[in-house]
Amino acid sequence: MSGRFLAKAATSTATFSVPAEDAVILVVVPAGGRQERKNGQLWIDGVYVAPAPKAAVNMRGIRDRQKVNHVLKIDVEAGVPAGESIKRFTFRFGSKILYEGDKIPKPLYLDTLSFHNGFYHLRVELEASGGSIDFCEIGVIVDNPSNPLSQPN
């Protein structure tokens, strides 16, 4: 979320276009209003207009309770508010942290052969430099028929 003005000092009409893949929250305020963030909210000229922009992270191409095996590519979409950066990105599988850093590895892979067959939570978490945090968690079922970790004794 950029929190920017699309038209300033408009006197009668203002026209703008939004690309099909974008979204917009339109707030009409007096021209030249002063934006500020406080208590997790966005205020313009002392009037509350929306929740403050925050970090957002999602995983694509994988469904909740999907059976997975071998090496899995994880597609991560992430964003932080304008003027901020990624402070911390964490990638977990079950209780194990597989990656933690200030960048999102591209590509991001999960080798399921390192784990016993069964149900696990796959979780990505993003913290922005401004302090906002978001996460996405999906349950997956590891099913590697030839996995020596999951063979009976």
Image: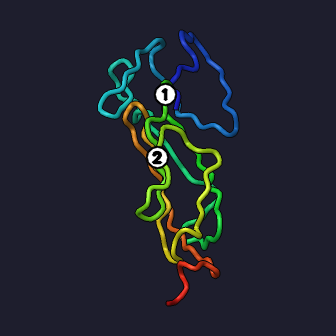
Neighbourhood count class around disc 1 (C-alpha, 10 Å): few under 14, some 14–19, many 20 upward: few
Tell me the residue at 47%/41% (across/down).
101
Mark 2 or mark 1: name the one nearer the start of the chain.
1
The kind of secondary structure element at disc 2 is strand
Compute the Cα span from label 2 to label 1.
37 Å
- x, y percent for residue 124: 49, 52
Colouring convention used in this rendered image of the protein: rainbow
Q: Residue at x 50, y 90 (%)?
A: 153
Per the rendering, the mark at residue 10 is none
Does residue 111 appear to the left or right of 125 in the view shown? Answer: right
Give the percent coordinates (x, y) of residue 32: 46, 11
Of the pair 45 and 75, the residue shown nearer to us: 75
Quadrant in the rendering for residue 72 = bottom right
Residue 100's label in the rendered image is: 2
Amino acid type, mark 2 = Glu
Location of residue 28 with respect to 63 vertically, above or below = above
Q: Of residues 54 and 48, which is closer to you in this image?
A: 54
**Rendering coords of residue 102 (x, y %):** 48, 37
The residue sitting at 46% across, 39% down in the picture is 55
For the residues bearing labels 2 and 1, Cβ distance under 8 angstroms? no
The residue positioned 43% from the left and 60% from the top of the image is 96
Looking at the image, which residue sits at the far left? 39
Q: Is residue 32 above or below residue 141?
A: above
Taking depth in this image into account, of 9 and 39 the one nearest to the observer is 39
User: Considering the numbered disc 1 on the image, is that residue within a helix, a strand or a loop?
Assistant: loop
Of tags 2 and 1, the one toward the viewer is: 2
Q: Residue 74's spot in the image, x, y percent? A: 61, 55
Q: Nearer the viewer, residue 136 or 31?
A: 136
What is the crowding at mark 2: few (fewer than 14 residues within 10 Å), some, or many (at least 20)?
some
Which residue type carries mark 1?
A: Val
Residue 27's label in the rendered image is 1
Total number of numbered discs in the rendering: 2
